Image (cartoon, rainbow, N blue to C red):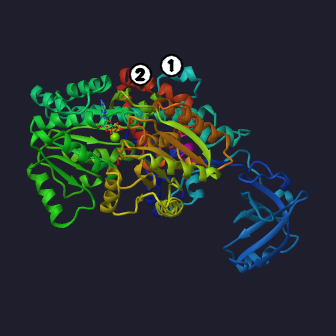
Amino acid sequence: MDAFSILNQPVVSLKGIGGQSVTRLEKLDIRTIYDLLFHLPLRYEDRTRIQNISQLRAGESALVCARVISCSISHHGRRLLNCQVSDETGLLNLRFFHFTAKQHNSLTAGTLISCFGDIKEGYSGFEIIHPEYKIIQSAEQCITQDSLTAIYPLTEGLRQSTLRKASSQALELYNASSEELPDLLPKALLNHYNFPSLNNALNTLHTPEVGVSSNNLLGTNPALKRLAFEELIAHQLSQLQRKTSEKQWQAPKLIDQPEHSQQFFDALSFKLTQAQQRVIQEIAVDCAKNSPMLRLIQGDVGSGKTVVSAYAALLALSNQHQVAIMAPTELLAEQHRRNFSLWFKGFNTQIAYLTGQLKGKKRTRVLTDIADGTAGIIIGTHALFQDAVNFSRLGLIIIDEQHRFGVNQRMALRDKGQTKNSKPHQLIMTATPIPRTLAMLNYADLDISVIDELPPGRIPVITRAIPSDRRDEVIAKINAWVAQGHQAYWVCTLIEESEVLQCEAAEESAQYLSAALPNIRIGLVHGRMKAAEKEQVMLAFKQHELDLLVATTVIEVGVDVPNSSLMIIENPERLGLSQLHQLRGRVGRGTEDSYCLLMYKAPLSNTSRERLNILRETTDGFIIAEKDLELRGPGEMMGTKQTGQMQFKIANLERDENLLASVSKAAALIQKDHPENIQTLVNRWLGTTTKYAEV
Ligand code: ADP
Ligand code: MG
């Protein structure tokens, strides 16, 4: 694309675009005609036909031609203008929260109007809030359009009509010019899927043809699929690019020192599993290279990832480098501190512990130890990438429970350990096994090791589903359980989005259980308690000064109390399968039978029932992950919203699942045959600026 290309023309050259709208378009990363072409509609409105009121459906938008029956200002609650209209087939309410006296006066009984808007089910029939409307003289003036109307994503202050005008001008200019956007996808793939050309696809989505439905355009239309495919490939290529560029950095060679590792392994109270040994080998090979390791360890809850990461830490220490271990919660960080203190007792290494709670002199002290290299092992939470933290010789970063952190956070910590031409090695652990197709898409920048074996002697947790109206039985069971000297967890799972509500629910449950179980020592942990308080309760539980621990899902990661072998999960239907599996992984760590009771609220939907059944039937995290994917779909499963990972302009993991398996293949093909296309593709779909900032 040369400088004089139509596609390079700035948006300001378009009619009706200037001043503020230029700035606003820029907020959407739209600067040129080219950018407009790739700013694709979010959805479509159907103004192609006048609909009978009797045939309206809530949730859809519709064009209606009707006469005003009555129009009045209502003062119930909020002041609003309520206008009832009717065609021959039924009644419809138009409601305006903002209106003028003129508007009120003009909508007299008998006035004919055409109106358009989203149909809602109101308390007195169908309604449209703030419809677009026009007073007309005869039904012929109720103008319909030939095809669907595209609705574009906007930004504050930018009008839909402005964007639509800009977009249609851009398309016209492009179509009229002799230029053609080069197709960056391999021909063979386009043919294989019967995909239209890029030109064609863009035209179809911006200006739908007559007769094409919105469901089709947002569903199975090949134009959409083709662009979604291209976007997915671009994401994959961008990750592969990142991998390549990361690998070009230097990294300290961390060579295994046999006498150190011998000492380390000998001091362990257990023998490593085959799987652990294999992954340790993979790490040793990576770390001995002078380019940075980027490795993800996937392993089920309890598969013993921590000790494997501790071996990696040993490699760093043996080569006079520091290691940073970052955990998503304080509970987990604290547990790592305990484990690492134990495992590195014989190595004369100082462990620094840094969380957000640490203040004042103590914090200064820890920061100094990290900066001057006194501390060899640094364990902490997000606090590790605060500005004040400076490492002396960071050789390795270990990140636990990667799904809790975004890619950006991962990268931010890496950048901290960076010197002029060298970056630390990186080891990432996750207990949320994700299915292969998704792993390839999401972790294409990482090498993956799998610990697919549990330490011997683990007895599978016996899982049962029980309706909550049998709560009394469950409570009796706890009583008997504790009488035998065991401990138990009671997990409250209320509403994920609200930590406050979740904590309140846990407090309530704790009170209720205290009343119902007067002879049992009950503790409570939730996310809003101070770290020190949490720590105290956890410690008391670990030392068996408490029998029952009531908790929110904060215990999902980080608790390891083998004597606690009964877990009750309240409202398990609210959580994803993988998350339930993680929670359940807290029990079954001892040598006796252990139980997980899923106390659901009846009646269960079919899907919920199916999900709970899967948990009862299997304890294999990978199988559970596959099922989770099947039942919830990839978007929700990956928690896209929480982590901000994998946000797409047009691709939709649920809808486009059938394409996922081909994405890697296509990306590889482009890498091999058309490496010159990679950057254009990545820029087209991910923008030219890599957004690292939001840590
Ligand atoms: P996760 O993979 O879920 O992080 P952990 O690393 O916390 O699992 O290990 C769970 C428990 O199993 C810990 O108490 C750990 O010390 C123990 N463990 C790890 N490896 C083995 C092994 N090979 N044999 C016996 N116990 C082990
Ligand atoms: Mg762990």
**Nearer to me, 553 or 515:** 515
Q: Amino acid at mark 1?
A: Ala
* Residue 454 visible in the displayed image: yes
Q: Residue at x 66, y 45 (%)?
A: 604
Q: Of the numbered discs in the image, which one, if any, rests on residue 313?
A: none
Q: Quick one: which residue is furthest to the right in this view?
A: 88
- Secondary structure beneath dot 1 equals helix
Q: Amino acid at mark 2?
A: Leu
Quadrant of the picture in which ligand 1 is shown: top left
**Nearer to me, 330 or 245:** 330
Can you say which quadrant of the picture contains the N terminus?
top left
The location of residue 226, given as percent across then percent down, is: 55, 32
Q: Which residues are magenta?
A: 166-176
Q: Quadrant of residue 410?
A: top left
**Nearer to me, 387 or 5:** 387
Q: Mainly helix, strand or loop, the magenta region? A: helix
Q: Of the numbered discs in the image, which one, if any, rests on residue 669?
A: 2
Mark 1 and mark 2 in contact? Answer it, CB < 8 Å. Answer: yes
Q: Quadrant of residue 304?
A: top left
Give how far apart the Cα atoms at labels 1 and 2 are.
10 Å
Q: Of the numbered discs in the image, which one, if any, rests on residue 188?
A: 1
Q: Earlier in the sequence, mark 1 or mark 2?
A: 1
Residue 185 among magenta residues: no
